[in-house]
Image: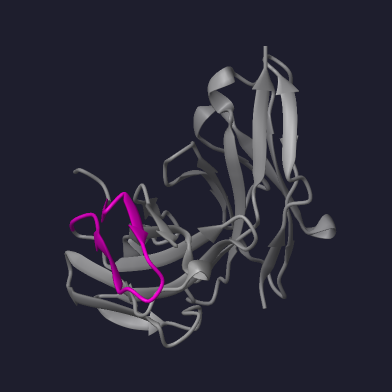
Amino acid sequence: AQSVTQPDIHITVSEGASLELRCNYSYGATPYLFWYVQSPGQGLQLLLKYFSGDTLVQGIKGFEAEFKRSQSSFNLRKPSVHWSDAAEYFCAVKSNFGNEKLTFGTGTRLTIIP
Amino acid sequence: DAGVIQSPRHEVTEMGQEVTLRCKPISGHDYLFWYRQTMMRGLELLIYFNNNVPIDDSGMPEDRFSAKMPNASFSTLKIQPSEPRDSAVYFCASSLRETNEKLFFGSGTQLSVL
């Protein structure tokens, strides 16, 4: 069965500093991978996705993520965070065999300090 | 489009009562998902529909939970009888087959069972 691990429950970063959120997946074949963001009191919003091809994918709000098959990872990065990036971030995985089930990680809460 | 609309935003009820959560997906979307979010278990997929037909309900915790989608613009998630451990945020999401990896989430229903 597919699964996702986000090892960091909570990360604090200074505004303007770089950010990397970790995500590891478990799946037998090449999965579809996603990062979603959840602002307080809101539903989730898709940041970016990886299906195939270029392993470095660009998303909205200046985020990017890199798929590394050898490490089963799909880490999210941003070179310079803004206070508005404070939110909860979820990595997710989906089978590429037509099953529409999206499995989410437990999330990483990002706090931005001035 | 107004996005995915869920009601109510907050529901407080007593143990043993019936609870009905409602969802209006984005017009034209053919997939609808119900997720539950708790601190302990994160985001769990309960059930999803394709063209109003339930496809996978393996995430529904027990028989107290039921979901229906009588038409393309409306779905309900019912809990009867409710228990304190059902307290969570329940999200509805919808997507298009062509871009079914991009889920559009509602703002959720915060359920508290006392």
Q: Quadrant of the C terminus of chain B?
A: bottom left
The vertical placement of A19 against A36, above or below, is above
Q: Is residue A88 left or right of residue A22?
A: left
Q: Position of residue B105 (x, y in %)?
A: 38, 51
Residue at x 62%, y 63% (from the top left corner): B41
Is A81 on the left or on the right of B71, as rendered?
right
User: Residue B11 colored magenta?
Assistant: yes
Q: How many marks?
A: 0
In the image, is residue A80 part of the stretch drawn in magenta?
A: no
Q: Quadrant of residue B65?
A: bottom left
Q: Is residue B6 above or below residue A100?
A: above
User: Which stretch did the figure color magenta?
Assistant: B6-27
Instruction: Work out which residue is located at the far right of the displayed protein and give it.
Output: A70
Q: Is residue A59 above or below residue B111?
A: above
Quadrant, the N terminus of chain B? top left
Q: At 53% across and 69% down in the image, what residue appears? A: B85
How is the model colour-coded?
one colour
Left or right: B114 in relation to A103 = left
Instruction: Decide which of B17, A2 is in the foreground and name it.
Output: B17
Q: Is residue B26 above or below residue A13?
A: below
**Residue B72, picture quadrant:** bottom left
Where in the figure is residue A67, as x and y percent of width and height? 71, 50
> Residue at 46% across / 79% down in the picture?
B60
Question: Can residue A19 be seen?
Answer: no
Residue A30 in view: yes
Q: Position of residue A7 (x, y in %)?
A: 79, 51
Is A97 in front, or is B42?
Answer: B42
Q: For the point 32% across and 68% down, which residue is it?
A: B31
Q: Nearer the viewer, residue B17 or A44?
A: B17
Rendered location of residue B82, percent (x, y): 40, 74
